[in-house]
Image: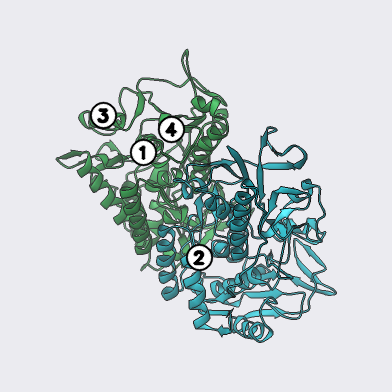
Chain colours: A cyan, B green
């Protein structure tokens, strides 16, 4: 039987596995964790709005009925394209006839890896738990030492993309609404939330007028937004922007990602972010049986770079799976064409922007649009139900259900 | 204003704080974590049935409206009864006029502290997360290395009290139902679950006929129960019972607890488990303004020792709070009288035993009884709702929603 190995059970890898359900192939899906993560809502876990279990689902449970898939929880250390094998961290090797590498991306500190300890990024449930503990812990510490509340209650979020905007907006909500009247020695609503963006506008993948609307909405939540501000240093005490210093108790990194280091082991040319420049059919140059998809692929569609978003990853997963089947039938693979259904970014409670086709909306309608899409795509009926119940309560009460430091 | 310090926000400490709501006192409630834990359902978190956030609630959120309470998340290192102060782990000191010590208990390995690394116990959310990861991880590892499945899928639970029985029963359910058909190389239903109890029967605080019924129910779930079996060693490979050896991938400790080490700093006589032998009014001998309640207290009521259960802790919390108020009015404190409303222990899906007054029930009715009581007492309407929804789904589908390794 034709052996397909898929590395990574994110949006792309999982979709590829599903697409191969009815084919005469033996699929092995490998991921370092036991769960598929609904990454677009991970910021809600980091800000205590949702429990970790609401945005994660065991991979093997999702694929329970698909008999041709074996799921392995394991770390992959390298791809050996010369021998059509992958190397596992435990030392053993796994052969493949076709391979799909969907290992995703990790944080990039632009060469300042020492900043990582002071400014955690948000990729995994572990990261989310750490950030949640840090945010909630800052208020706890301030209540113990009110004389240091000024610094402790300054939150700096670095990076004005979707994650940065969501984090800053939600932290502002927590300080102004959720925690109000729960403290005796400090006033949480005096907290400062500062979003630092190196470029001239936030959410730069949106059209400029929408970016501007997002900025207004974010400011209305009480977030101080610093544009054209380049972070020059981060340490235990805060952030430096050139000569200026921001003393902060919590710094969160949402500024950059880089491709998984697994890309390097493929032995082909990588772009500046470490991504693999794939062929039109998503295969690796010189290795027609190896595909790279999702955030790890530098792919183009009709001459335009494909963005690193989940719908693109899913579409690539389907295309790679189809091309494997075509090649098994000795037919040529088809080129990947990205279908852009639009984009939506949320800023906080009842605030968002969206562009889809000719549509441009912002504020409450955009937020409703965002809500429906995200709940709809959340895997599994149960999770949808739970998230909706959590949010219905949160929306009307301003409370957040998952405020646990652990 | 009269300063009351309460150490510990478990059932006892929290109840004491609430009881003081309308009194002219200034309450400081100190706990090392930011949340009150609904300990009776913690085993559900450890066995992936509930999210951590379903059984934990921020202490300051619970006491939000009670203006005379300041909540501090902090570790207490000692009580200095001579100077009416407590020492905090950060080095600073806090004076009190009245003190309630409700610091609870921790695991006891009966002098074998080295066993702790191989056989985690279940007290905190952190413990629950660790045990959940270990149980789920054992199946993942077995799927990677099916040749070692025999050992990896042997789960030994040590201790036949409520926690041990709940854990063993639930692990058996997981192996026989939840994980069925999710693996390709192993059969989870072949897993062995062994409950080891040193005494002649499980759930010894119940009457013997009910214990016997519990044993039958537990065995019907596929649990092997070893009575009169004393564990003589635990290491990375499993458990020794005298000359017999049980090779096991997972060992869970539910055998013994000991009082918080804080008791030692009170400078009074402790019993064998390290608990403080309190006066009838729950005060510490020689220190009428210091009360010890909950698991930390060796209290008697009408000549009978008070059991270490949450209703007793709550009742002690109320009594200690009342006695503080009486003493402020120069009246003598009243003795503590424990009102026993009965006991219920669950064994697994639709299986339980209960005794209350003249009532003795087991099986499905006892389980329903257990369910209603536990959901009723879970703090907060939202949590009740979430837990019920989770359980309704779990009951009918045998699935478990929180199967995340992180």
Quick check: marks 2 and 3 in contact, CB under 8 Å? no
Do the residues bearing badges 3 and 4 touch, measured as CB atoms within 8 Å?
Answer: no
Which one is closest to the eye, mark 3 or mark 4? Answer: 3
Dot 2: few (<14), some (14–19), or many (≥20) neighbours within 10 Å?
A: many
Chain letter of mark 3 equals B
Query: Above or below — where is A200 with respect to A73?
Result: below
Q: Chain of mark 1?
A: B
Which residue corresponds to mark 2? A49
Residue under the point 75% across and 79% down: A227
What is the spatial separation of the Cα atoms under label 3 and label 1, in whole angstroms?
14 Å
Total tally of numbered discs in the picture: 4
Same chain for labels 1 and 4? Say yes or no.
Answer: yes
* Picture layout, residue B343 above or below residue A294: above
Q: Position of residue B289 (x, y in %)?
A: 43, 53
Q: Viewed as shown, does residue B2 lie left or right of A239? A: left
Residue B205 visible: yes
- A96 and A194: which is toward the camera: A96
Between disc 1 and disc 4, whose residue precedes? Answer: 1
How far apart are labels 1 and 4 at the CA level?
15 Å
- Report crowding for label 3: few under 14, some 14 to 19, many 20 or more residues within 10 A (C-alpha): some
Can residue B270 be seen here? The reply is no
Tell me, yes or no, whether dots 4 and 2 are on the same chain. Answer: no
Q: Secondary structure at mark 2?
A: loop
Residue bearing the label numbered 1:
B166
Question: Residue B256 — which label?
Answer: 4
């Amino acid at each position: 039987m034709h052996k397909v190995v898929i590395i990574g059970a994110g949006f792309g890898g999982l979709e590829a596995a599903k697409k191969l359900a009815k084919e005469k192939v033996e699929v092995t899906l490998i991921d370092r964790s036991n769960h598929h993560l609904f990454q677009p809502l991970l910021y809600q876990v980091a800000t205590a709005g949702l429990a970790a279990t609401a945005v994660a689902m065991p991979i093997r449970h999702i694929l329970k009925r698909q008999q041709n898939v074996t799921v392995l929880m394991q770390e992959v250390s390298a791809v050996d394209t010369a021998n059509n094998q992958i190397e596992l961290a435990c030392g053993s090797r796994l052969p493949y006839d076709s391979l799909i590498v969907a290992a995703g991306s990790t944080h990039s500190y632009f060469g300042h890896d020492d900043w990582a300890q002071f400014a955690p990024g948000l990729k995994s449930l572990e990261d989310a738990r750490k950030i949640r503990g840090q945010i909630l812990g800052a208020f706890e510490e301030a209540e113990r030492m009110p004389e240091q509340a000024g610094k402790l209650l300054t939150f700096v979020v670095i990076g004005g993309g979707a994650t940065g905007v969501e984090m800053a907006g939600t932290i502002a909500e927590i300080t102004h609404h959720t925690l109000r009247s729960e403290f005796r020695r400090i006033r949480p609503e005096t907290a400062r939330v500062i979003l630092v963006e190196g470029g001239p506008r936030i959410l730069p993948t949106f059209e400029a007028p929408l970016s501007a609307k997002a900025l207004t909405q974010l400011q209305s939540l009480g977030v101080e937004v610093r544009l054209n501000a380049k972070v020059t240093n981060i340490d235990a005490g805060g952030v430096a922007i050139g000569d200026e210093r921001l003393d902060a108790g919590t710094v969160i990194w949402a500024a950059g990602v880089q491709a998984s280091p697994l890309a390097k082991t493929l032995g082909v040319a990588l772009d500046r972010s470490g991504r693999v420049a794939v062929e039109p059919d998503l295969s690796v140059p010189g290795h027609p049986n190896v595909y790279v998809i999702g955030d790890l692929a530098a792919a183009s569609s009709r001459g335009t770079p494909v963005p690193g978003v989940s719908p693109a990853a899913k579409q690539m997963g389907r295309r790679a799976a189809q091309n494997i089947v075509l090649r098994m039938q000795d037919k040529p693979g088809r080129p990947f064409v990205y279908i852009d259904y639009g984009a939506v970014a949320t800023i906080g409670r009842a605030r968002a922007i969206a562009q889809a086709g000719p549509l441009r909306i912002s504020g409450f309608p955009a937020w409703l649009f965002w809500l429906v899409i995200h709940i709809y795509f959340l895997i599994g009926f149960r999770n949808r139900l739970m998230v909706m119940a959590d949010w219905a309560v949160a929306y009307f009460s301003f409370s957040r259900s998952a405020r646990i430091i652990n």
